[in-house]
């Protein structure tokens, strides 16, 4: 069931997950990282123009000591030495002076950060989520946002995953149970 979308700029934040140099080098599907970056930049520019809160989230580890090390069946996403600019936000996106920066050390953007505090102090009730990867950083942040009682909108074409199947699963089965899934153009049109 699709509901009409209206977003009040003063109560809505754009939360951008891991649009950073190192992550943008990953092979992604169904959308290329460059296509996602273009849509994320459009969203951020529209939010800034309306005076809405923009949060740019990156993932980083100071010395590797704060990284989680679960025993898993799949290898970690990255191994070895990371380039110096790995965690730097992609230049076309910003950051701009009005943006809030969050560095996370886990998959989700809420745990161990000031994200919830910053959103609540500004009276934010709705977040628009986008970024890379759909089923990892975006979905984990969405699950945390649900636990914090935020309304959510998911910018389907402003996120991508490590496989098309991962993206389709999150967008088709998980996100509709937590919020509304829309395209970039629909979200920009709905922002007041």
Image: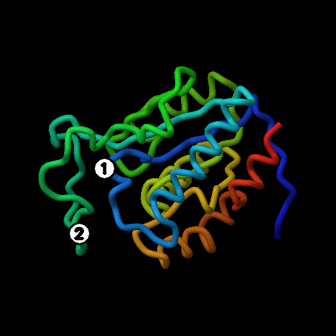
Give the residue displayed 22% in from the left and 41% down from the top: 66
Residue 128 x, y percent position in the rendering: 65, 46
Image: 105 above or below 155: above
Image: 179 above or below 172: above
Give the residue displayed 21% in from the left and 38% down from the top: 84
Residue 190 x, y percent position in the rendering: 81, 47
Q: In this view, does 69 lie to the left or right of 110?
A: left
Q: Where does label 2 land, which residue?
A: 72
Mark 2 vs mark 1: in front:
1
Mark 1 residue crowding within 10 angstroms, few (<14) / some (14–19) / many (20+): many
157 or 38, nearer to the observer: 38
Coloration mode: rainbow
Residue 157's label in the rendered image is: none
Q: Where does label 1 land, which residue?
A: 22
Give the residue displayed 21% in from the left and 35% down from the top: 62
- Tell how many labels: 2
Give the residue displayed 35% in from the left and 43% down from the top: 59
Element at badge 2? loop
Element at badge 1? loop
Residue extending furthest right?
A: 4
Residue 3 x, y percent position in the rendering: 85, 60
Image: 156 above or below 20: below
Query: Where's the N terminus, which quadrant?
Result: bottom right
Quadrant of residue 185 within the rendered picture: bottom right
Mark 2–mark 1 Cα distance, whole angstroms, equals 22 Å
């Amino acid at each position: 069931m699709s509901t009409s979308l209206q977003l009040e700029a003063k109560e809505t934040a754009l939360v951008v997950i891991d649009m950073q140099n190192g992550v943008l080098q990953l092979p992604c599907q169904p959308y290329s990282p460059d296509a996602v970056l273009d849509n994320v930049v459009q969203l951020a520019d529209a939010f800034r123009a309306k005076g809405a809160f923009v949060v740019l989230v990156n993932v980083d580890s100071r010395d590797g000591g704060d990284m989680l090390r679960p025993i898993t069946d799949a290898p970690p996403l990255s191994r070895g030495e990371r380039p110096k600019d790995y965690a730097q936000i992609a230049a076309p996106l910003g950051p701009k002076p009005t943006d809030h920066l969050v560095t996370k050390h886990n998959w989700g953007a809420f745990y161990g950060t000031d994200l919830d505090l910053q959103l609540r102090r500004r009276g934010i009730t709705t977040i628009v989520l986008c970024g890379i990867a759909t089923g990892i950083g975006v979905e984990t942040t969405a699950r945390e946002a649900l636990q914090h009682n935020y309304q959510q909108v998911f910018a389907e074409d402003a996120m991508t995953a490590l496989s098309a199947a991962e993206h389709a699963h999150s967008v088709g089965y998980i996100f509709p149970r937590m919020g509304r899934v829309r395209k970039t153009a629909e979200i920009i049109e709905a922002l007041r």
